Amino acid sequence: MTAPFRIPPAIGRLLGRLPPQPPAWLFVQGLNRILAPQLPEDVRQALFARRLRLRVEDAGLAIDFGWQGKGFEMARHGDQPDLTIGASAHDLVLMARRQEDPDTLFFCRRLILEGDTELGLLFKNTLDGLDASAFDWRKLLPKFPTPPGARHG
């Protein structure tokens, strides 16, 4: 068995020095495109005005965000979140693609949930109910038209 990919420590330290806004903005845009359309109304209500933090442990990134009724928005970095979700970049991708169960990662101490227990359970149950095909990056990229006169393979 090979070890899971981890961002090299030197790159993680460099990423950790970046301002939090650019990665938070990108992350929130992705959530609004992929996750928001799949959220049931009861989950939207439970998330309303709650502060969440995603910690990408090996990248040195902490992204603060929350649901504000019509979509996810960046939250002010540094305020105390209601729930912190922490894992390596690799494990977060595996969870999003439904290739690894959050329970397995949690019990192997590869997923950290800190804060509101009920909100943590909501996070886990919401992940379990998502359509994994929504996380296929090939479907997320915009379709670019073929330039006139270009030859196809």
Image (cartoon, rainbow, N blue to C red):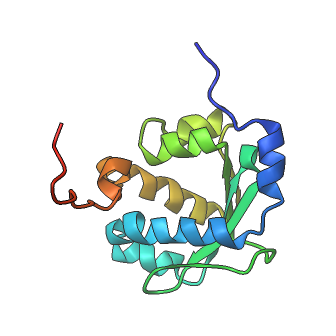
Q: Position of residue 79 (x, y in %)?
A: 79, 78
When the figure is inspected, residue 28 is found, relative to residue 106, above or below; the finding is below
Name the outermost residue toward the bottom.
69
Left or right, 13 with respect to 115, comes to right
Residue 148 figure quarter: bottom left
Q: Position of residue 110 (x, y in %)?
A: 67, 37
User: The C terminus is located in which quarter?
Assistant: top left
| Number of numbered discs overlaid on the protein picture | 0
Q: Position of residue 114 (x, y in %)?
A: 72, 57
Kindly tell me whether residue 52 is visible in this rendering: no
Name the outermost residue toward the top.
1
Q: What's the residue at 73%, 57% (across, down)?
A: 61
Q: What's the residue at 65%, 70% (across, down)?
A: 22
When the figure is inspected, residue 19 is found, relative to residue 153, above or below; the finding is below
Q: Is 143 in front, or is 111?
A: 143
Kindly tell me whether residue 26 is visible in this rendering: yes
Q: Position of residue 29 (x, y in %)?
A: 49, 71
Residue 41 figure quarter: bottom left
Q: Is 18 in front, or is 69?
A: 18
Q: What's the residue at 58%, 64% (across, down)?
A: 118
User: The N terminus is located in which quarter?
Assistant: top right
Q: What's the residue at 50%, 39% (across, down)?
A: 94
Q: Is 99 in front, or is 153?
A: 153
Q: Is 88 in front, or is 109?
A: 88
Left or right, 74 with respect to 8, comes to left
